Image (cartoon, grey):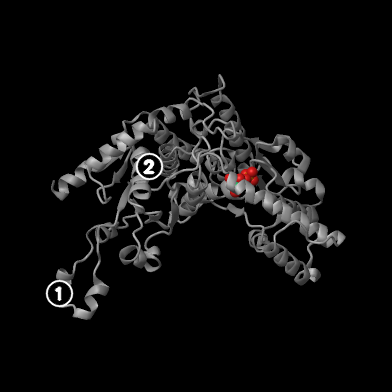
Amino acid sequence: MSDTERCKSMMVEFDGILLDYSRQIANLDTLNKLYNLAEAAHLKEKINRMFNGERINSTENRPVLHIALRAPRDSVINSDGKNVVPDVWQVLDKIRDFSERVRSGAWVGDTGKVLKDVIAIGIGGSFLGPLFVHTSLQTDPEAIEFARGRQLRFLANVDPIDVARNIAGLNPETTLVVVVSKTFTTAETMLNARTLREWISAALGPQAVAKHMVAVSTNLTLVEKFGIDPNNAFAFWDWVGGRYSVCSAVGVLPLSLQYGFSVVEKFLKGASSIDQHFYSAPFEKNLPVLLGLLSVWNVSFLGYPARAILPYSQALEKFAPHIQQVSMESNGKGVSIDGVPLPYETGEIDFGEPGTNGQHSFYQLIHQGRVIPCDFIGTVKSQQPVYLKDALAYGKTAEQLLKENVPHPLIPHKTFSGNRPSLSLLLPSLNAYNIGQLLAIYEHRIAVEGFVWGINSFDQWGVELGKSLATQVRKQLHASRKKGEPVEGFNFSTTTMLKRYLEESADDVPKED
Ligand SMILES: O=P(O)(O)OC[C@H]1O[C@](O)(CO)[C@@H](O)[C@@H]1O
């Protein structure tokens, strides 16, 4: 088969997006084998079970329905016999109404000033997705118009530096704080929420919290306990995983405050378009399925554990950090969905940077060091060339270098072995709709990988363990500082570190842990 024929047979287009996977180390025979693998793994049935609202997140006994967050108002998606779409739209309508009131100045701060700045507090899935979409929209011509005079900032890190950076230059009188936490128990988020509550109260009095703080959570009881009026809370549901929550109020509220609901609705529509495609397109034309199967091929069959995500658009600079969480928290698992240790490794090590910055950073390793399958993401309108894929695929031979009169000792250094897998996704432009498409393509690709590997991509017991260990450490630090209790119950290494930290920070104790 000629290269042209090969390329033609390995390109798929849907809704303006072109996928070229001809630079993978795979041919049509490989693809056929992967379709057989998908069949053996019951991929189609698993996708159907997800869309039918079955409790496929079995270890948490929950359905996985982030697709319902962007479903058209008149669609029906049942979970336990109940259509969840009206609930989704009830919250979306509430967001539309609230964000319009804030943006128009109908809802003002405690001193009567318009709330033009928003700080969204959250971490992990309650932060990375909204940050990615915000960063992508920030330079979109339509979104710029809607955001004029407004600022949206994100506070995630518990390091006080992040608080200092977030409040720098902002006036509490004109700032609205959105506390975003699915559980409303995450230590980092709650500490930052208390800090900003204090920032508002100290400047304007405790009564101002009602006008300057709102929340997004599944746990409305804890929201109220924190002191936020439940009327100013925006709900979502336990069938939305944290890392899949950007299309819920988690992302839609802060983004609507900044850009207006009409722009955010386009983002939801883009994601919904891919949902329909994922559900109904045959595998050989199905973008997320093809991408997922090729990932499984690269990881499990070719043994390449990493993947570089390389958008040729600065606007997508926060895409790789978001996908890192979605992918690695979903598929970094050691046992099958039935709890049996896996005889193979799952998950990819995702990393990335926008090209061309990445080219001047880690591309050397990709060209001549380790083999890292690359996703090149381009946009037609940005006119950024996606030229590197051919350098990776074809390489450069010693013969070519000799013809170019390259001195002998330099030939090994200048030789590129080639045959390094990459693929390209070309988007027509990067507006809100396209950003929604891109998000959903990757979300579903990751689900495909997990379905084929036979794991539960929708739980995260590893990070849950980390959270409970962190709580144990926090309690110990508190008890030692406030009551002088000895450090107990940790291994030698941790005990040594905690003791050293307590000794060295004795003069520098924050009032609240
Ligand atoms: O939204 P919450 O409940 O504050 O949790 C934040 C994040 O913490 C995790 O549970 C673990 O890091 C993520 O899955 C989640 O997105």
The residue shown at (50%, 50%) is 322
What amino acid does circle 2 point to? Answer: Gly
For label 2, the residue is: 292
What amino acid does circle 1 point to? Answer: Leu
Q: Quadrant of the C terminus?
A: bottom right
Label 2 Cα neighbours within 10 Å, binned few <14 / some 14-19 / many ≥20:
many
Q: Is residue 450 something one can see in this rendering?
A: yes
- The number of discs equals 2
Which label is found at residue 263?
Answer: none
The residue shown at (41%, 44%) is 438
Q: What x and y, as percent, mark residue 396?
A: 21, 66
Comparing 341 with 30, the one in front is: 341
Where is 361 relative to 126, above or below? below
Residue 131 horizontal side relative to residue 343, left or right: right
Comparing 411 with 67, the one in front is: 411
Where is 77 relative to 95, above or below? above
Residue 90: image quadrant is top right
Which badge, 2 or 1, comes first in the chain's sequence? 2
For label 1, the residue is: 402
Q: Which type of secondary structure does the marked residue at label 2 adopt?
A: helix
Which residue extends farthest top?
Answer: 81
Label 1 Cα neighbours within 10 Å, binned few <14 / some 14-19 / many ≥20:
few
Q: Which type of secondary structure does the marked residue at label 1 adopt?
A: helix
Q: What x and y, as percent, mark residue 73?
A: 50, 26
Q: What x and y, as percent, mark residue 247?
A: 52, 39
Instruction: State the CA–CA distance, disc 2 to disc 1.
Output: 40 Å
Q: What x and y, as percent, mark residue 132?
A: 50, 50
